[in-house]
Every structure is written in C-alpha cells, then in structure tokens.
Image (spheres, helix red, strand yellow):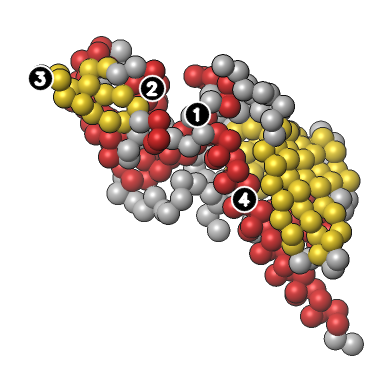
Amino acid sequence: MRALAEPNRRRILELVAGAERSAGEIAAEFDVTRPAVSQHLGVLREAGLVEERREGTRRLYRARPEGFVPLRAFLERFWDDGLERLRLAAELEEGRRRSGSSSG
Amino acid sequence: MAVRQDEAVEREVRIAARPETVFEFLVDPEKQILWMGRRAELDARPGGIYRVEINDQSTARGEFVEVDPPSRVLMTFGWEGQEAAEGAHGIPPGSSRVEMTLEPDGDGTLVRLRHYGLPEQAREMHGQGWELYLGRLAVAATGGDAGPEPNLSAG
C-alpha cells in the first residue's frame, strides 16, 4: 500500500497544517478507526512532517513547517538536478560524436 | 499576503556540447530519459504532448508551445493528478510554463531554464514538495529504500 494512494494521510496533514489538533479531533474528521489514525500519525511523525505534544492526557499534533519544502525551493532543486543530468548526458553524447567523426 | 505572481524560477548551466547535441535531449524521448524521467512521450511541435514520468508518484505533463531547433523550447508544465488542485497547492498540467533557451558559448552551450506562470496558491509551502515527501513516506512505510533525495528520476 502506497502512502500517496492513502488520501487520509494527506488530509491529516492538511488538517494539522493550520492548527494544532488532538488525535480525537483528527479521528472525528475521518471515516476510519482511531488506531488507523494513530498509525498514520506515527508514520507522519517518523518522517518529521508532524510533531506531537502532550497536554495532560491529550496528545496534540501539528504539522512541522520545516518538514516541508517550499515549492520554489523544490523547483530550484528539481531543475538543478535535471540540468546537471542533462549536462552529463549531453557531454557524454558530444564526446562520443567527436571521437567518432574525428577519425578519418 | 500574496506573493508576486510573475516571479519565475530561473536556472542555468553551461554544457560542453553544441546546441544541436543538447537540443536533441529536449525533444527526443529516448534522450529525454537519459537525464530526466524513466519514461517519456514527446511530440515536439506546437500543440504536441510533453509527458515525462518521473517516478511512481510524479508525472510531468504539458504541451509544446514553441519548438525552435536548436535554440529554444517552450512548453506548458504541470503534474498529472493535480488537475483538481485539491487543497489548492498543486500545479495542474498546463498551468505553468517552462522555457529553455540554448545559446552557443564558445564550443559549448549555455542553457537557461525559466519556469514561470506558477499558480498563485502553489507558491505556498506544500505543493509538489509535499507530494514527493509523501511519496518517500510510501516507500519508507513499505520498508523499501526511499533514497537520499525526495524525488528525482531513477537515473
């Protein structure tokens, strides 16, 4: 089972992105069992996307902004990585052609 | 607190290869996947499809707008699955533009990339980064190796 195909996990993130919420409040928003919500929260915590705080017997959750990449930063990295690969691939091809055509 | 919409992502790289060589990597599907994506469908003419499957979670999709060998390619760009832009953080296919210009530089090429026209909402935090992190979660959750970086092509 892939987490991306797991829309509840995404919804949990959206839910706790704006405000801190208790596990109970989160579970109330979904048509899944409380243990299932706890499991999602566990995975999200492990990935550093959500943080947990205890208040008495309640556990409160909220998204960690630093766990996310701003879109702009993501695109910069995405294209930098792409262009670097483009450079390597094109230079390899160019070298192949030059050595191929220089013999004669 | 709106961010200026016309703010583009701009990158450049110098490549020790002629523009003619570099250009092929932008329009030939077999060459495309040597640098980005694991599968590509490219019909490099105005209105032709641009579709690059990056990994299980992400497929870039758009249309070629202008194709000017060997110096320029302009295409629309977005991510499949974000058509509805649920949560309003996505980049739907066709919603932004990527322009790549190839300029001779000595015996090499200066490649400039400009990604612009991003949806206003997509400028906020999550967007694709979010998706990709979730993609990593998917792998991690199944006990696989999520790899060192949250994404990119499987080389």
The residue lying at 58 percent from left, 45 percent from top is A78
| Relative depth, front residue between A84 and B145 | A84
Q: Would you say residue B89 is visible in this rendering?
A: yes
Q: Which mark is residue A89?
A: none
Above or below, comparing residue B124 to residue B71 in the picture: above
Dot 4: chain letter: A
Do the numbered discs 2 and 1 sit on residues whose CB atoms are within 8 Å? yes
Tell which circle, 4 or 2, labels the residue nearer the N-terminal end. 2
Dot 1: chain letter: B
Residue A68 position in % (x across, y down): 43, 35
Tell which circle, 2 or 3, labels the residue nearer the N-terminal end. 2
Amino acid at circle 2 = Ala
Residue B81 position in % (x across, y down): 55, 29
The residue lying at 55 percent from left, 39 percent from top is A73
Residue carrying label 2? A17
**In whole angstroms, how far apart are the C-alphas of marks 2 and 3?**
22 Å
**Badge 4 and badge 3 in a common chain:** yes
**In whole angstroms, how far apart are the C-alphas of marks 1 and 3?**
32 Å
**Could you tell me which quadrant the N terminus of chain B lies in?**
top right
Do the numbered discs 2 and 3 sit on residues whose CB atoms are within 8 Å? no
Residue carrying label 3? A57
Whether residue B86 sits left or right of residue A49 in the image: it is right
Amino acid at circle 4 = Asp
Residue carrying label 4? A80
**In whole angstroms, how far apart are the C-alphas of marks 4 and 3?**
47 Å
Label 2: few (<14), some (14–19) or many (≥20) C-alpha neighbours in 10 Å = some
**In whole angstroms, how far apart are the C-alphas of marks 2 and 1?**
10 Å
| Relative depth, front residue between A97 and A20 | A20
Residue carrying label 1? B125
